[in-house]
Amino acid sequence: MKFCSKCWKIGHVRDQCKASLQRCRVCLDEISKKEEHTCTKRQKCAQCGGEHHSLQSICHVIEQYRSDLKEDVNKALESGKLHRNDYTKQQHAFSMKDQDFPQC
């Protein structure tokens, strides 16, 4: 899931953010100087304005974003544009030998 750590909205990252000032992760107040910010501790969502953290799965906007993302990934897998790695293949067992280490 792509999200911005400056404004806490989904769909872009910090380097692409158009917000002029950093926002508090919890209360979303603008922060001009970090050391001067006193958080209200009242949670506010950057997506819907609800009283929860901006990236919580209880947010209907986040839920829809994840659903759309999952659908897009599945379509890309089906069309062959994306391939899933198979991590179930047998790996060679790791072994340590005394001769691999310096003698004291």
Image (spheres, helix red, strand yellow):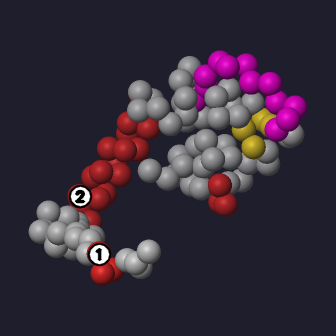
Camera sees residue 41: yes
Picture residue at 20% right of the left edge, 64% below the top = 87
Displayed quadrant of residue 33: top right
Residue of label 1: 98
Picture residue at 22% right of the left edge, 71% below the top = 95
Secondary structure beneath dot 1 equals helix
Kind of residue at badge 1: Asp
Quadrant where the C terminus sits is: bottom left
Kind of residue at badge 2: Asn
Relative height, residue 34 to residue 81 (above, below): above
Front position in the image: 100 or 26:
100
In percent of width and height, residue 36 lies at 87, 32
Relative height, residue 23 to residue 18 (above, below): above
Camera sees residue 81: no
Which residues make up the magenta segment?
A: 34-45
Q: Is residue 102 left or right of residue 21?
A: left
Q: How many marks?
A: 2
Magenta region's main secondary structure?
Answer: loop
Front position in the image: 62 or 99:
99
Label whose residue precedes the other's in the sequence (2 or 1): 2
Q: Is residue 57 left or right of residue 32?
A: left
In percent of width and height, residue 24 lies at 70, 34
Q: Residue furthest front?
A: 104
Check residue 74 in the rendering and tell me which mark sits there, or answer none.
Answer: 2
